[in-house]
Image: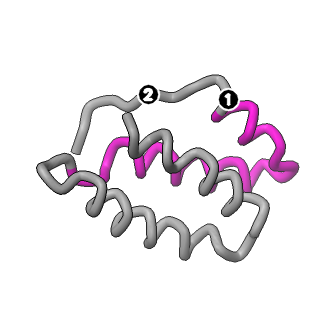
Amino acid sequence: MKDSFVFYRSFMDSINTVPKLKDKYLLLESIIKLGLFSKNNDNIEENFITFSAKLEQKLSKNLHILGVFYAIKPQIIAN
């Protein structure tokens, strides 16, 4: 587990395109979990992908929020 991650203004702009508050919360929670709780070790990208697959399955019921998550995920992985 990490203590912090980078959260950009563009992430918030993307989250704000989601109309339902419940869906915004689910998306924001998923982004935070990806940023903080994915394992941080030598094979970090593989861990992010495995961890994010579980989050993506949860988000897959709403393609809009899944699309926003997909747009944000690469930047979190890069950081």
Q: Amino acid at mark 1?
A: Ser
Q: Residues within 10 Å of mark 1 (few under 14, many from 20)?
A: few
Residue sitting at x 67%, y 63%: 66
- Quarter of the figure with residue 49: bottom left
Which image quadrant: the N terminus? top left
Q: How many marks?
A: 2
- Quarter of the figure with residue 51: bottom left
In the rendered image, residue 53, in percent from the top left (x then y), is placed at 45, 71
Q: Residues within 10 Å of mark 2 (few under 14, many from 20)?
A: few
Considering depth in this image, is 54 or 29 the residue closer to the camera? 54
Q: Does 38 appear in magenta?
A: yes
Q: Does 23 appear in magenta?
A: yes
Considering depth in this image, is 7 or 32 the residue closer to the camera? 7
Q: CA distance from mark 1 to mark 2?
A: 11 Å
Q: Is residue 16 left or right of residue 34?
A: right
Q: Secondary structure at mark 2?
A: loop
In the rendered image, residue 15, in percent from the top left (x then y), is placed at 72, 41
Q: Which residue is mark 1?
A: 10
Residue sitting at x 56%, y 72%: 58
Q: Is residue 75 above or below residue 58?
A: above
Chief secondary structure of the magenta portion: helix
In the rendered image, residue 33, in percent from the top left (x then y), is placed at 42, 50
Q: Amino acid at mark 2?
A: Val
In the rendered image, residue 30, in percent from the top left (x then y), is placed at 52, 54
Q: Which residue is mark 2?
A: 6
Segment tinted magenta in the rendering: 11-39
Q: Is residue 67 above or below residue 10?
A: below
